[in-house]
Image: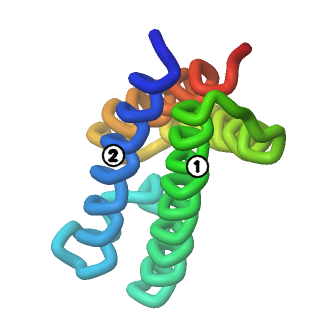
């Protein structure tokens, strides 16, 4: 798989994830069905979702910068390091999703985070 295809795939995934977290934040999706069923209050959900939305937006920005660098034929060690960190983050999330109480989160969350980890690896591999 080419890096640009992997990047475009990540843009799509992160866009869907941002919409999903916005639906949770606005309570259109019940918060007790996500975060492995561990959230205990609306306030706790708002904190988790705000952090998640900001983190996903940050990842989108970094991946967009990587996309631009590819188009210019240049690289950035800082951007590549951040994407390696994202790959590690997605691997850890994959493990966390395996312990979810929700079957939907177990299956979809695991597939999504594992796919994201692989895509991040493709994006930064030499």
Of residue 55 and residue 106, the one placed in the foreground of this image is: 55
Residue furthest out toward the bottom: 43
Q: Which numbered dot is residue 102?
A: 2
- What residue is shown with label 1? 65
Q: Residue furthest top?
A: 1
Secondary structure of the residue carrying tag 1 is helix
User: Residue 9, located in which quarter of the rendered image?
Assistant: top left
Q: Secondary structure at mark 2?
A: loop
Q: Residue at x 32, y 53 (%)?
A: 15
Task: Tell me: 85 left or right of 62.
Answer: right
- Judging depth in this view, the residue of 61 and 88 nearest the camera is 61
Residue depicted at x 47% and y 14%: 2
Residue 107 point in image, percent of width and height: 34, 31
Q: Residue at x 45, y 44 (%)?
A: 100
Question: In what quadrant of the picture does the C terminus appear?
Answer: top right
* Mark with earlier residue (1, 2): 1
Give whichever of 40, 68 is nearer the camera: 68
Q: What is the C-alpha distance between the residues marked 1 and 2?
A: 35 Å
């Amino acid at each position: 798989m080419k890096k640009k295809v992997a990047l475009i795939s990540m843009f799509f995934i992160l866009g869907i994830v941002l919409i999903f977290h916005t639906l949770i934040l606005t309570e259109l999706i019940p918060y007790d069905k996500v975060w492995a069923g561990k959230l205990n209050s609306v306030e706790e959900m708002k904190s988790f979702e705000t952090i998640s939305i900001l983190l996903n937006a940050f990842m989108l920005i970094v991946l967009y910068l990587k996309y631009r660098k590819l188009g210019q034929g240049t690289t950035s060690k800082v951007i590549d390091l951040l994407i390696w960190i994202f790959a590690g983050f997605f691997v850890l999330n994959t493990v966390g999703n395996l312990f979810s109480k929700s079957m939907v989160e177990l299956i979809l969350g695991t597939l999504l985070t594992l796919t994201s980890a692989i895509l991040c690896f493709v994006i930064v591999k030499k």
